[in-house]
Image: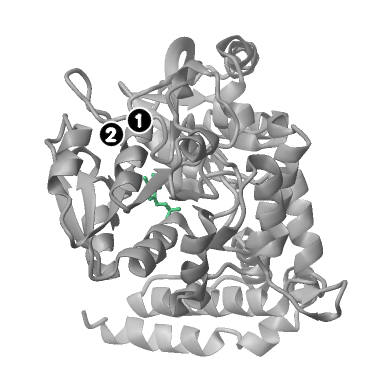
C-alpha cells in the first residue's frame, strides 16, 4: 500500500536516522555483550533489530527509539537467543525411551568417557601393545565377551543398519522366512519388508497376523531359503488368541535344515527387568541361550547407551558381515564407541542402577509418589493452577514392552486462565523446554522421567512465572 506523500517523506527521513550496524556495535553495552556472548551472536541480533526497525518505519507510524533503547533491546535479544538448536529438555511425559527426545540419556560415567576421548587423541584403531594399526571393535568386543560369553561383536550406527547389513551379507538373493505377525513398522520409517527388499533378500511371509507355528516355517522352506528371521514385534501387541513358536524350536528347525536363524531383538535388554511393565521383554542372554545364530539390537533402548546397532552371533557369520564394504559406511565414530564402552563397563560393575533408563524402570510407584506429593505441595501455592495427584502409567517406549505400562503417580495441572494445551505450549517454550502430556484438558507430569531435583525445581520455577 502506498503511504501518503507527507508520511513517506517523514519516514524516509527517519530511515536515514537509523544508526549503522558498526556504530551500534561500538557502543560499550554491545561491546560488552559481544565479549560475553560472542560477536557473531550480537551482530546477528543487531542486524535483526535494524531490519525490524526499517520494516516498521516503512509500514509507517513508528517513532524511532533512542540509541539507549535500541542497544538495550539488542543486548536482551542476543542474550535470549539459545546458543544451540539441539539442547537438553526436561522429559515429563513418562515415556522412558522417547525417540523424539533422544531415547536413553547416558550415564554420567559414559558422558565423562566420551568427553575424555573426544577432546584428546585416542587408541581408537591403534594396538598399543604392538605399536601398529588395530581394530576399533576391540574396545567393546571384550565387554560383550565378558558379559555374555560371546565373541565377536560388531557395532554399527543403529539397529536398522545392523539388520540391513546382516540381511545383505547373509541372505542377498535368497529367501528369508518371517512370520506375518512380526512385520513391524518402527517409528514410521523402519519397515522390515522394505529393509529386506533393499538388502536384496526375498521375504517369504508365513502364518497369520496372530498365529504362526513352527510347522508354517517348515512348510515354506525351499532350496532358495537361507534364513529364518524372528523380529521382536515392537510398538504393538496382539492380545488374546495368539501363537508363535519358541525360539528354541525355530533354532532346531533352522539347524536341522542347514539354515541361519537371525533375530532382530529391537531393545536388547542386558539386565533382567523385574518391573511389572517390562517382565516379558526378551533379553539378549535368553536369545543366545536359545541358539540364535545372529542377533541384532539397539544401543540406546533398554541397554541405556548411545545410538548404535549391535550384532552378536557365530564367528563364521559375523566375519563376512565385517568384510562387507557397507560395514565401513555403517561403522560408528569414536564418541559412540566411548559411550558404549563406558555403559557396558557399568554392567560389568553391576552398576545398572546408574544406567538412566534402568533406574527409571526400577523406580517404584511409591518412590514416584513421594516426589509427586512434594512437587504438588510446592505448586499448590500458585492460585492459577489446580493441582491433583492421580494414578497413571509410565511406558518404557522405544518399541520395548508393547502394551505394558509401569504404574506411576501423575501430577495433573488444570490451569484457571488458559487451556491445558496453551500451558503445555508455554512449558515447551521454557528454557530448558519442559515436555508434558495433555490429557482431559489438563497438563500431566510424570516424574519418572524427570531426572533429578534440579529439573523438578525448574518445573516449579517455570510454572511460578507462568502463573503470575
Ligand atoms: C527400534 C527397533 C529397530 C530400529 O532400531 P534403531 O536403533 O532405531 O535403528 C529395529 N527393529 C526393532 C524390532 C526395533 O524395536
Q: Is residue 31 left or right of residue 152?
A: right
On screen, 94 above or below 408? below
State the residue position of label 2.
236
Q: Is residue 86 left or right of residue 345?
A: left
**At which x and y percent is residue 60?**
36, 75
Of residue 145 and residue 358, the one placed in the foreground of this image is 145
On screen, 77 above or below 257? below
State the residue position of label 1.
402
Q: Does residue 150 show up?
A: yes
Kindly identify the residue that appears in the image at 18 percent across and 60 percent down: 223
**At which x and y percent is residue 132?**
80, 82
For the residues labelled 1 and 2, say whether their Cβ atoms are less than 8 Å apart: yes
Q: Is residue 363 left or right of residue 292?
A: right
Residue 365: which quarter of the image? top right
Kindly identify the residue that appears in the image at 39 percent across and 58 percent down: 163
Q: Quadrant of the N terminus?
A: bottom left
Kindly identify the residue that appears in the image at 19 percent across and 42 percent down: 217
**At which x and y percent is residue 303?**
57, 41
Comes first in the chain, label 1 or label 2: 2
Q: Which mark is residue 114?
A: none
Amino acid at each position: 500500500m502506498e503511504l501518503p506523500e507527507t508520511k513517506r517523506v517523514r519516514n524516509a527521513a527517519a530511515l536515514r536516522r537509523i544508526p549503522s550496524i558498526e556504530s551500534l556495535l561500538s557502543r560499550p553495552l554491545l561491546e560488552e555483550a559481544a565479549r560475553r556472548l560472542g560477536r557473531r551472536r550480537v551482530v546477528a541480533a543487531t542486524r535483526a533489530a535494524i531490519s525490524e526497525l526499517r520494516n516498521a518505519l516503512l509500514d509507517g507510524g513508528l517513532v524511532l527509539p533512542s540509541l539507549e533503547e535500541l542497544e538495550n533491546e539488542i543486548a536482551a535479544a542476543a542474550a535470549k537467543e539459545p546458543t544451540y538448536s539441539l539442547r537438553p529438555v526436561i522429559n515429563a511425559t513418562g515415556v522412558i525411551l522417547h525417540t523424539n527426545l533422544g531415547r536413553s540419556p547416558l550415564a554420567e560415567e559414559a558422558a565423562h568417557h566420551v568427553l575424555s576421548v573426544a577432546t584428546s587423541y585416542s587408541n581408537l584403531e591403534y594396538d598399543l601393545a604392538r605399536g601398529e594399526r588395530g581394530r576399533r571393535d576391540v574396545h567393546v568386543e571384550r565387554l560383550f565377551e565378558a558379559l555374555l560369553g560371546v565373541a565377536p561383536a560388531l557395532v554399527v550406527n543403529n539397529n536398522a543398519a545392523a539388520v540391513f547389513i546382516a540381511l545383505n551379507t547373509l541372505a542377498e538373493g535368497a529367501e528369508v522366512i518371517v512370520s506375518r505377525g512380526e512385520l513391524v513398522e518402527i517409528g514410521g520409517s523402519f519397515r522390515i519388508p522394505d529393509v529386506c527388499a533393499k538388502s536384496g533378500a526375498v521375504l517369504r511371509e508365513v502364518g497369520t497376523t496372530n498365529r504362526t507355528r513352527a510347522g508354517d516355517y517348515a512348510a515354506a522352506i525351499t532350496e532358495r531359503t537361507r534364513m529364518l528371521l524372528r523380529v521382536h514385534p515392537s510398538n504393538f501387541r496382539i492380545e488374546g488368541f495368539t501363537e508363535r513358536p519358541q525360539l528354541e524350536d525355530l533354532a532346531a528347525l533352522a539347524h536341522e535344515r542347514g539354515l541361519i536363524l537371525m533375530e532382530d531383538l529391537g531393545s536388547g535388554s542386558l539386565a533382567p527387568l523385574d518391573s511389572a511393565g517390562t517382565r516379558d521383554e526378551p533379553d539378549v542372554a535368553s536369545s543366545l541361550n536359545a541358539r540364535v545364530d545372529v542377533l541384532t539390537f539397539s544401543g540406546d533402548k533398554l541397554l541405556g547407551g548411545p545410538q548404535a546397532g549391535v550384532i552378536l552371533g557365530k564367528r563364521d557369520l559375523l566375519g563376512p558381515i565385517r568384510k562387507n564394504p557397507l560395514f565401513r559406511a555403517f561403522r560408528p565414530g569414536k564418541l559412540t564407541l566411548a559411550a558404549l564402552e563406558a555403559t557396558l563397563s557399568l554392567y560389568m560393575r553391576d552398576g545398572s542402577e546408574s544406567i538412566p533408563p534402568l533406574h527409571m524402570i526400577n523406580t517404584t510407584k511409591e518412590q514416584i509418589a513421594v516426589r509427586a506429593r512434594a512437587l504438588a505441595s510446592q505448586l499448590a501455592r500458585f492460585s492459577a493452577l489446580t493441582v491433583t495427584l492421580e494414578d497413571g502409567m509410565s511406558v518404557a517406549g522405544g518399541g520395548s514392552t508393547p502394551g505394558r505400562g509401569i504404574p506411576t503417580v501423575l501430577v495433573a495441572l488444570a490451569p484457571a486462565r488458559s487451556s491445558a494445551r496453551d500451558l503445555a505450549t508455554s512449558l515447551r517454550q521454557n528454557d530448558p523446554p519442559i515436555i508434558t502430556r495433555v490429557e482431559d484438558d489438563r497438563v500431566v507430569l510424570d516424574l519418572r522421567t524427570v531426572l533429578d531435583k534440579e529439573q523438578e525445581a525448574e518445573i516449579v520455577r517455570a510454572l511460578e512465572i507462568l502463573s503470575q
